Amino acid sequence: MQKTLTRVSIALALGMIGSQASATNGDQMLGVTAMQWGMAGAYTAAPQDAATVLTNPAGLADLSMQEFRSDFGFGFLNPPRKVNGQDSDSDLYLIPSGALAYRANDRLTLGMGMAGLSGMGVDFPDSAPGLAGNQAIVTTKQFFKIAPGFGYKLNDKLSLGAALNIDYQSLALYNPMFQLPQNQVYGFGATFGLTFKPSERLSVGASYTTKQQMDEFKWNTLNGTYGMTMDGPSILSLGVAIKPMPGLLVEADVKHIGFSDVLDSIDFKTPAGTSKMKFGWDDQTVFAIGVQKQINPKTTVRIGYNYGESPIGPEDVDSNIGSLAITEQHLTLGLTRQFGDRLFTSLSYAHAFHNEVTSNSGSGNTIELEQNVVNLQMSYRF
């Protein structure tokens, strides 16, 4: 019985954790739009597009617009990864995003954002070559967030904002032990933020996203009912941005992601009872720096660097076989080209450098990942 329970735990770890890794800071993306990705996730103090409603809603009040702004785009994720030397057969995923902002008056700006913040899946033909037969693992997972919010300018220096988080999450898991078909749940949370500009050259920002409280997944199968709950972590972000000269912006952010509150362990309900799934994820501190330079009135370029230590250590590899949430260092590039006063487009490329983690328990299990992400964004304002 204990052996069976252990195999079930490992299989679930593959499905839940491995399927979350569309992101590069644990299970959280560096950004939402191409502009945010180009700055490597350093956007808390100097938001530049309507997607700030998802990350720091106070930034809505500071956007460069008169009445209306829209920012829509999509990204492609290519994540080469391995489990014990076996490649996953799925290697390309679509990431949608979009946001709107409306300036109601000189102080109040309303916004609405939607983005796929986590998801994709894995397709390993044999995750444990040393065992008899093929230990195939196939998962799919999606996590979308819709965020209506507002930014309010208290005065020329201070803006505050808040957004409601409406979450959608789906998950399917197929492995040698059982098959759990696609299922959907919903959840809620909130994001609060502020920006403060003591001078024309300096701005600071802060935002806090609460823990995302999700409904319980339930699967009714021929063997009985399975169930589990997968909440989203809280995120605290602090940023400082400076403009040392006209056309040049430098921003540095630090983020604390509370993974230990949601992915240290999860209760997994089976027909035989409830078992505690110990994943052992640690909280993650992320450092990001981005530089933006306006080359001419129509062209702006960006470069950024992002680092966050993997929330999964060698002691927890056996509980996270197939996890793709282990990348640590990221380099990003970005470009914005303006077409007239109202329309412009942005492009970004991010590379998460190869990282691998091997179990220190003597099992020899190894997980590997690197990532490439390309984002395209179209923006319109008036």
Image (cartoon, helix red, strand yellow):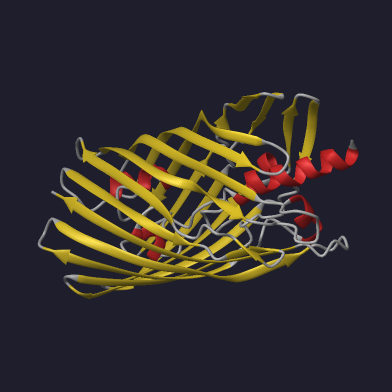
Residue 92 at x, y = what percent?
Answer: 45, 59
Residue 103 lies left or right of residue 49; in this view the side is: left
Residue farthest toward the front in the current orientation of the protein: 133
What is the count of numbered marks? 0
Indicate the quadrant where residue 220 lies. top right
Indicate the quadrant where residue 194 lies. top left
Residue 335 at x, y = what percent?
Answer: 29, 69
Residue at 37 percent across and 57 percent down: it is: 75
Residue 29 at x, y = what percent?
Answer: 49, 54
Residue farthest toward the bottom in the current orientation of the protein: 295
Indicate the quadrant where residue 175 lies. top right
Residue at 26 percent across and 50 percent down: it is: 71
Q: Nearer the viewer, residue 72 or 363?
A: 363
Q: Is residue 361 visible?
A: yes
Q: Classify 102 as above or below 350.
A: above
Residue 52 lies left or right of residue 90; in this view the side is: left
Q: Nearer the viewer, residue 234 or 274?
A: 274
Residue at 25 percent across and 42 percent down: it is: 101
Residue 360 lies left or right of residue 296; in this view the side is: right
Residue at 11 percent across and 59 percent down: it is: 341
Q: Nearer the viewer, residue 257 or 86?
A: 86
Q: Is residue 307 visible?
A: no
Residue 18 at x, y = what percent?
Answer: 62, 51
**Quadrant holding the N terminus:** top right
